[in-house]
Image: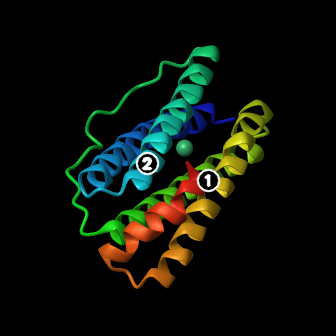
Amino acid sequence: MNKNKINKNLNNQLNLENYSSNLYLQMSAWCNIENYKNASIFFKKNSEEELKHMEKIFNFLCDINILPILNFNIYFKINFNSIQDIFKKAYINEKKITRNINYISNIAFKKRDFKTFHFLSWYILKQNEEEKILKTILDNLKFFNYNNKNFLIFDNLFLSKYI
Ligand SMILES: [Fe+2]
């Protein structure tokens, strides 16, 4: 059984969660400066959640005596053009996370590593939830003509449900 492959991918997932936390914190800052207050709170809360997701994997690896390795080279400067751009990028990021979770889950299941598979099942459900929220927000954004003035209305009326 190739446990190393599973652990390597779990460690990769840990870094993706950490990256997501920073990405959403940056998005929160952008929204704050642009006066999209609820969107800013939304991404700040998401950033904090991603950090917890990272810590869960960190603890899991420590529990099975695997040293978590934080990768400081995955960060790059990212620019946002608009509020729509931000939500699209957040959705793309979550889809990427889902693909990775599914990939590791598949390996863990095939290798009969049920402990890891069980651990990852929480993430599978979580990803479904996170993708659904972002998809709903993106779908609703279409009714607001994708302009910044309209988004202020959207920010006040719609996003308040998600914070
Ligand atoms: Fe996450």
Q: Whole-percent x and y of residue 47?
A: 44, 40
Q: Residue at x 75, y 47 (%)?
A: 110
**Element carrying mark 1:** helix
Give the residue type at disc 1.
Answer: Tyr
- Residue 17 marker: none
Q: Position of residue 150 (x, y in %)?
A: 38, 76
What is the three-letter code of the residue carrying label 2?
Phe
Q: Residue drawn at (38%, 67%), measured in percent from left and top?
A: 152
* Residue 8 in view (yes/no): no
Residue at point 39% right, 71% down?
151
Say if 14 sits above or below 157 in the image. above
Residue 29 percent coordinates (x, y): 28, 46
Q: Observer-nearest residue: 58 or 128?
A: 128
Which quarter of the rendering shows the N terminus?
A: top right
Query: Looking at the picture, does residue 57 appear above or below residue 141?
Result: above
Q: Going by the image, does 72 lie left or right of 65?
A: left
Badge 1 density bin: few <14, some 14–19, many ≥20, Cα 10 Å: few
**In the rendered image, which residue does mark 2 sit on?**
43
Say the numbered circle drawn on residue 103. Answer: 1
Tell me which numbered mark, 1 or 2, is placed earlier along the sequence: 2
- Report the coloring of the rendering: rainbow
Please state the horizontal and vertical placement of residue 9, each as a whole percent of the image.
53, 40
Which residue lies at the image location 30% right of the left edge and 43% below the top edge? Answer: 74
Graded by Cα atoms within 10 Å as few (under 14), some (14 to 19) or many (20 or more), the crowding at tag 2 reads many
Element at badge 2? Answer: helix
Front residue of 76 and 136: 136
Residue 18 in which image quadrant: top left
Occupied quadrant, residue 22: top left
